[in-house]
Image (cartoon, grey):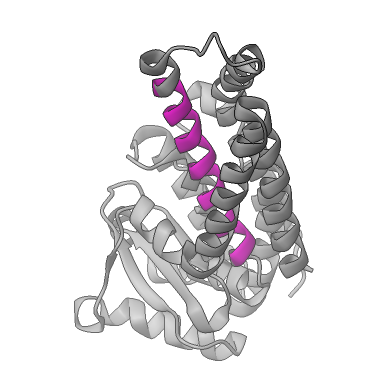
Amino acid sequence: MNNFKAWLLMGLLTVLLVLIGSLINGRSGALLFFIIALAMNFFSYFFSDRVAISMTRSKPLAEHEAPELYDIIRNLTSSAGLPMPKVYITPSSQPNAFATGRNPAHSAVAVTEGLLQILNRSEIEGVLAHELAHVKNRDILIGTIAATIAGAITMIANMLQWGLIFGGGDEDNDNGFLGLAATLLMIILAPLAATLIQLSISRTREFQADASGARIAGQAGGLANALLKLERAASRIPMQVNPAASHMFIVNPLSGESFTRLFSTHPPIAERVRRLEELRL
């Protein structure tokens, strides 16, 4: 089902970009944006994990650097029946984590430096079980594709904005007014569209991953306690991360920003903890 959603998301992106290209520069614009959409779809499917790692500035973490972390992950992957993912460290003092990749065989988990400092073993197990649940539920593909697409939409909007500033308009072009209107609309709506893409996929996935992660870990208390700690820390410790990737993290890394909370890609932590406490394993 999640693979279908991923293809649907990429199809909608293609239609959206072709329409925008058509409004900006007629048939030639539509063709150009169609080619761009195909390239983006190919790249986001096969290389979305690398994009996510790059957007978060994460680096590979060797086993000798974090033997206890590797031990936890091995135990959890064995319990979940999953292959061992690649392990990364994100250079941030805010405690957080995310998973990425197009399938379990090409998956990766990343934890921040702050997470290893603030959580105990049981809580780390809960967080990593949640991330491995994303892998097991096969919803990391659509999450990483959404991050890639959201980032691309924002990048295109920025390019159009600078083009509008320095390129001016073409008064001889019959479609000049429509192109200008489409460009302005894209500049205004693109960041909102990127957020809506993330909102459409994130909230339900988090509830499902919480429940599945608790079952993988064999207990819900570690994850519940971790979520409360992570929420408090996220409100105090900022993270320098591309907003397009914020929905991938276990808690919203931008939750300290009041405006961002209005469009939160994550369900309320209190509701997640309540559901975990009511979970019967």
Residue 263 position (above or below residue 62): above
Residue 125: image x %, image y %?
47, 72
Residue lying furthest front: 172
Residue lying furthest top: 171
Q: Quadrant of the C terminus?
A: bottom right
User: Is 93 on the left-hand or right-hand side of 144?
Assistant: left
Q: Is residue 224 visible?
A: no
Q: Nearer the viewer, residue 13 or 263?
A: 13
Q: Nearer the viewer, residue 127 or 89?
A: 89
Residue lying at 50% horizontally and 44% vertically, measured from the top left: 152
Residue 82: image x %, image y %?
56, 87
The quarter holding residue 180 reads top right
Q: Is residue 199 magenta?
A: no
Residue 142 position (above or below residue 233): below
Residue lying at 54% horizontally and 8% vertically, measured from the top left: 171
Residue 101: image x %, image y %?
51, 70
Residue 160 position (above or below residue 125): above
Magenta portion: prevailing SS class? helix
User: Is 79 on the left-hand or right-hand side of 121?
Assistant: right
The quarter holding residue 205 reads bottom right
Residue lying furthest left: 64
Q: Is residue 25 visible?
A: yes
The quarter holding residue 86 reads bottom left
Residue lying at 72% horizontally and 54% vertically, measured from the top left: 11
Q: Quadrant of the N terminus?
A: bottom right
Report the label total.
0
Q: Nearer the viewer, residue 228 or 113?
A: 113
Residue lying at 25% horizontally and 53% vertically, measured from the top left: 91
Q: Is residue 155 magenta?
A: yes
Query: Which residues lie in the magenta part?
Result: 141-162
Residue 248: image x %, image y %?
52, 53
User: Is 235 on the left-hand or right-hand side of 197?
Assistant: left
